[in-house]
């Protein structure tokens, strides 16, 4: 049997019930009919929510005003009903429901004015608005057809109406076999024929024979006479009309018109014939060959660009570079050098021409092993030119003005810059960077470009060269005398922020993908001091580049010794420790280790009385009430879906079969708690994230229930044994009642009625319904709340007043002495939380929730310093701990603070402190 259609829940809170009572009373007073739960499509409307929503939007008149509020009712219907293909009709139904049930109430309750009479409000359609200004004088009530007839003087009685109507001419029925009903009904009745005057040609004198005998006419003569005079047949129709037969219709012969739409092939052949006729004899002679202009598309744009770039023709180069720049920018993630052999070499050859603009040199790339490249303008295309710097310095500089250039100079430099931009865009793809790193000429290009004269005209090209170096140096092994390595270090001496940052990144990535270690030797002392000074600048990007450089540089002991001689390492360590909490944000949360089901707090179980009240509702509202009572939202908690479903089954098992499927129940959890969601955790474990069991169940108004701790000798009044924290059995074998009631007066009356068995007064006395607390010598009263022994020595007390006064001390107190009495209250203690809330100073993390950014790199540099400082032998390091203790001693407390409060960095700081402790620091 398929599951029943789910209907929306109406939150039947105390506010809703009071509102409906007021609304019912208002409609009874007004004499109108109230529909308490109007249905719109498959759902029912919550009148309280609808009233609040419309009033919040400005009232019925403003929502209905199509000029001021576009589609107001449609948006409201979508919020209440949901998206639907019938949304316009449902919007009008929602408007009509508000109009009939809440419009008059809104005017009286919200606007404090008298609503229009029901004859011009509830009794008419909901079309239009302006209810606040509607009166009997200005309202044009819709007029029905019967009302209009009465206004015109017609009589409503059916019989009299038929008599007073204008009589209609009766249609003539022809029963003649030769006639057809279709013909007679389709044609109007023929008008009477005119009878021509025919004088009597006979003699006026009649003989005796003629006067005594009248001859009857012959049938033929009668027919002729009747045809001439237009006489009618017995059925009232003309014989001509009766014998009429329509003329036979013949189909028209249509000839289709040939157009390009229905005959494209015809027009294509026609155009081809005209083209061949106009081409002359040459085309006919070479028919079949792919001549220029014959429609052959030729090579694709990539091959054209490559051939144009190799041609050396300026116009062709501009064409190629224009398209390559566009392609590398828009399709750089798919455009690879491997697919177009020779393109990378052609681009490098083009950018190498930049040196000819400033020096009297024209480079030639040689791929022969025996070619000598020590002199001249030949570059080694196999392994790179080791003496490229000497060759560049030996060239004769050209007289160039940085302010004024010729048109040829500017055009050539523009083409070279575009070629460099194409390479820069292409190497952003990892495959292209690995491909071009195998071409030795790319190293010569970067070296030449970075050592050109410092002019503003080539700044853009130099930045492209640095960005290319940043992507390809991870595939290079550069020694201390390598021209590219020296060129990158020289960029750190300038003042260009962009060039400095990119150069630091390129140096820090040297040999990153190789097994060979990047030692970063022969770094000048001045450069190291500048890097340490840049750490003080409030520039996150510059600091990140400096930290990447320092992390690679401090990976060897010799470099750390050089750093000690050239820079203030103590100041550097202080700055690095400060950066461990860079942009840290406070986050209060519970620390969760491995989630175990047995650590989850027990799910409260409700008493039979509460469960009986829930059974009056249908699903899914019943399960929603149970979830709200026993669970609460917690973004850091989760529980398995199977445990939640089993708890629901166990709670409602004694009350009959289920009409709620597991999948619908899990979906209803997300509907009940907005932040809760079904997820798949590690190990393919299906969980509900965002909820946890309550410490104590609550009622519909979210007020917690109180558990009765009265010790009884019989089983508690529950279908199953409740699960609560604390003992439920005393030394005498008694168990707790565990009945759930609202704290205060309701709990007190429960004890008097169920445990002390105090009767109530009879109904005929003045105090009807009160408990009978007069002294009774036949019985005694005792207190068994939570194992209380207050009356144990006296074995009970006769006075019910004294016993009740003592019992009230165990119940929640809201009086002014509540704090004083709280220490003597032996009611159930508040359940302890499953985890402790801690305040974390979290820094940036990556997608794996691991440390990232400046704090991580700072911790790694500190760890390198701690490991290698202990190996440096200096005169000032003879005391215990040596340099490590002198440098890291003042910042130990800060390191421990970061380890205790930074969740992402705690493992890295722990490794750092172990390295410090290993050398006695």
Image (cartoon, helix red, strand yellow):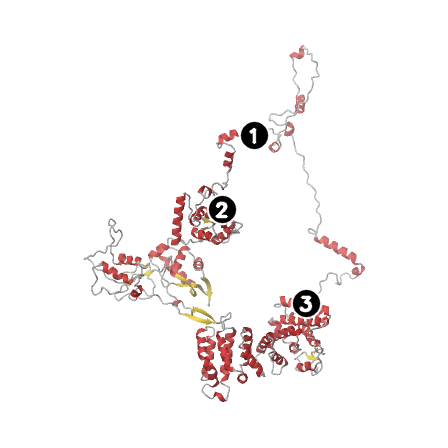
Asked whether residue 1 appears in the rendered view, the answer is no
Position of residue 732 relative to residue 128, above or below, is: below
Q: CA distance from mark 3 to mark 2?
A: 65 Å
Give whichever of 289, 718 is nearer the camera.
718
718 relative position to 549: left or right: left
Q: Name the N-terminal-most of marks 3 and 1.
A: 1
Q: Residue at x 46, y 63 (%)?
A: 679
Q: Which circle marks residue 863 in the picture? A: none
173 relative position to 268: left or right: left
Position of residue 266 relative to residue 794, above or below, is: above
Tell me whether the residue at label 3 lies in contact with that at label 1, contact meaning CB atoms closer than 8 angstroms: no
Tell me whether the residue at label 2 lies in contact with that at label 1, contact meaning CB atoms closer than 8 angstroms: no
Q: Name the N-terminal-most of marks 3 and 2.
A: 2
Q: Residues within 10 Å of mark 1 (few under 14, many from 20)?
A: few
In front: mark 2 or mark 1? 2
Residue 475 location (% of width, % of height): 60, 77
Q: Residues within 10 Å of mark 2 (few under 14, many from 20)?
A: few
Element at label 3 = helix
Residue position for label 2:
130
Residue position for label 3:
322
In front: mark 3 or mark 1? 3
Tell me whether the residue at label 3 lies in contact with that at label 2, contact meaning CB atoms closer than 8 angstroms: no
Element at label 1 = loop
Residue 32 location (% of width, % of height): 42, 43
Q: Residue at x 49, y 75 (%)?
A: 580
Element at label 2 = loop
Give whichever of 388, 787 is nearer the camera.
388
Residue position for label 1:
168
Q: CA distance from mark 3 to mark 1?
A: 87 Å
Give whichever of 703, 295 is nearer the camera.
703
């Amino acid at each position: 049997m398929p599951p029943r259609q789910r209907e929306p829940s109406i939150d039947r809170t105390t506010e809703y019930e009071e509102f409906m009572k007021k609304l019912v009373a208002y409609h009874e007073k007004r004499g109108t009919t109230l529909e308490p739960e109007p249905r719109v499509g498959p759902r029912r409307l919550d009148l309280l929510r609808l009233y609040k929503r419309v009033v919040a939007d400005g009232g019925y008149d403003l929502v209905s005003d199509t000029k001021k509020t576009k589609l107001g009712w449609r948006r409201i219907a979508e919020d209440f009903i949901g998206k639907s293909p019938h949304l316009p009709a449902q919007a009008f139904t929602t408007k009509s429901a508000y109009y009939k049930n809440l419009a008059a109430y809104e005017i009286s309750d919200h606007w404090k004015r008298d609503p229009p009479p029901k004859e011009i409000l509830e009794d008419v359609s909901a079309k239009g608005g302006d209810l606040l200004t509607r009166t009997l004088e200005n309202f044009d009530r819709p007029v029905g057809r019967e009302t209009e007839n009465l206004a015109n003087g017609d009589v409503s009685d059916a019989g009299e109406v038929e008599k007073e109507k204008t009589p209609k001419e009766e249609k003539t029925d022809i029963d003649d076999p030769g006639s057809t009903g279709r013909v007679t009904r389709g044609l109007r009745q023929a008008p009477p024929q005119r009878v021509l005057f025919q004088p009597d040609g006979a003699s006026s004198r009649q003989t005796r024979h003629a006067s005594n005998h009248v001859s009857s006419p012959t049938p033929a003569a009668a027919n002729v006479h009747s045809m001439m005079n237009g006489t009618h047949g017995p059925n009232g129709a003309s014989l001509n009309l009766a014998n009429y037969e329509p003329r036979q219709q013949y189909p028209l012969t249509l000839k289709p018109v040939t157009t390009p739409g229905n005959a494209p092939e015809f027009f294509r052949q026609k155009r081809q014939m005209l083209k061949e006729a106009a081409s002359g004899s040459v085309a006919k002679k070479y028919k079949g060959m792919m001549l220029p202009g014959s429609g052959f598309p030729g090579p694709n744009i990539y091959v054209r660009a490559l051939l144009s770039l190799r041609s050396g023709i300026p116009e062709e180069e501009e064409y190629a570079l224009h398209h390559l720049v566009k392609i590398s920018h828009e399709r750089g993630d798919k455009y690879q050098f491997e697919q177009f052999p020779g393109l990378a070499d052609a681009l490098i050859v083009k950018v190498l021409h930049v040196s000819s603009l400033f020096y009297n040199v024209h480079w030639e790339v040689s791929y022969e092993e025996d070619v000598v490249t020590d002199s001249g303008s030949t570059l080694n295309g196999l392994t790179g030119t080791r003496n490229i710097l000497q060759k560049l310095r030996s060239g004769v500089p050209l007289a160039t003005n940085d302010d004024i250039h010729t048109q040829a100079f500017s055009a050539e430099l523009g083409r070279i810059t575009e070629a460099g931009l194409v390479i820069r865009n292409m190497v952003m793809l990892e495959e292209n960077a690995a491909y071009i790193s195998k071409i030795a000429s790319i190293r010569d290009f970067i070296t030449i470009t970075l050592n050109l004269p410092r002019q503003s005209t080539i700044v853009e090209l130099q930045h492209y060269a640095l960005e290319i170096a940043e992507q390809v140096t991870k595939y290079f092994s550069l020694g201390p005398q390598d021209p590219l390595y020296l060129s990158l270090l020289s960029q750190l001496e300038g003042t260009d922020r962009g060039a400095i940052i990119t150069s630091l990144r390129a140096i820090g990535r040297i040999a990153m993908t190789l097994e060979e270690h990047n030692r970063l030797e022969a770094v000048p002392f001045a450069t190291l001091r500048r890097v340490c000074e840049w750490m003080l600048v409030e520039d996150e990007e510059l600091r990140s580049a400096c930290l990447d450089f320092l992390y690679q540089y401090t990976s060897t002991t010799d470099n750390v010794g050089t750093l000690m001689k050239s820079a203030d390492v103590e100041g550097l360590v202080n700055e690095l420790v400060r950066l461990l909490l860079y942009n840290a944000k406070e986050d209060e949360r519970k620390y969760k280790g491995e989630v175990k089901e047995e650590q989850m707090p027990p799910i409260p179980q409700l008493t039979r009385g509460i469960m009986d009240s829930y059974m009056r509702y249908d699903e899914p509202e019943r399960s929603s009430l149970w979830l709200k009572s026993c669970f609460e939202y917690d973004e850091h908690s989760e529980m398995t879906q199977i445990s939640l479903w089993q708890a629901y089954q166990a709670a409602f098992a004694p009350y009959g079969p289920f009409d709620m499927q597991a999948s619908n129940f899990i979906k209803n959890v997300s509907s009940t708690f907005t932040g809760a969601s079904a997820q798949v955790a590690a190990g393919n474990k299906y969980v509900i994230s965002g909820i946890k069991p309550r410490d104590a169940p609550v009622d519909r108004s979210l007020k917690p229930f109180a558990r009765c701790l009265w010790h009884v000798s019989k089983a508690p009044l529950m279908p199953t044994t409740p699960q609560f924290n604390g003992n439920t059995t005393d030394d005498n074998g008694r168990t707790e009642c565990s009945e759930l009631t609202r704290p205060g007066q309701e709990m007190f009356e429960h004890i008097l009625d169920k445990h002390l068995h105090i009767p109530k007064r009879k109904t005929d006395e003045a105090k009807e319904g009160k408990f009978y607390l007069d002294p009774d010598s036949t019985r005694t009263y005792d207190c068994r709340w939570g194992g209380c022994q207050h009356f144990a020595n006296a074995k009970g007390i006769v006075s019910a007043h004294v016993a009740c006064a003592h019992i009230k001390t165990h119940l929640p107190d809201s009086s002014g002495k509540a704090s004083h009495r709280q220490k003597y209250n032996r009611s159930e203690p508040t359940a302890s939380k499953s985890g402790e809330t801690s305040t974390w100073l979290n820094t940036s993390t990556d997608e794996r929730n691991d440390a990232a950014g400046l704090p991580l790199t700072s911790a790694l540099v500190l760890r390198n310093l701690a490991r290698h400082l202990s190996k440096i032998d200096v005169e000032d390091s003879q005391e215990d701990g040596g340099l490590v203790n002198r440098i890291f001693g003042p910042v130990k407390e800060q390191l421990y603070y970061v380890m205790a409060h930074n969740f992402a960095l705690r493992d890295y700081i722990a490794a750092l402190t172990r390295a410090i402790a290993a050398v006695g620091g």
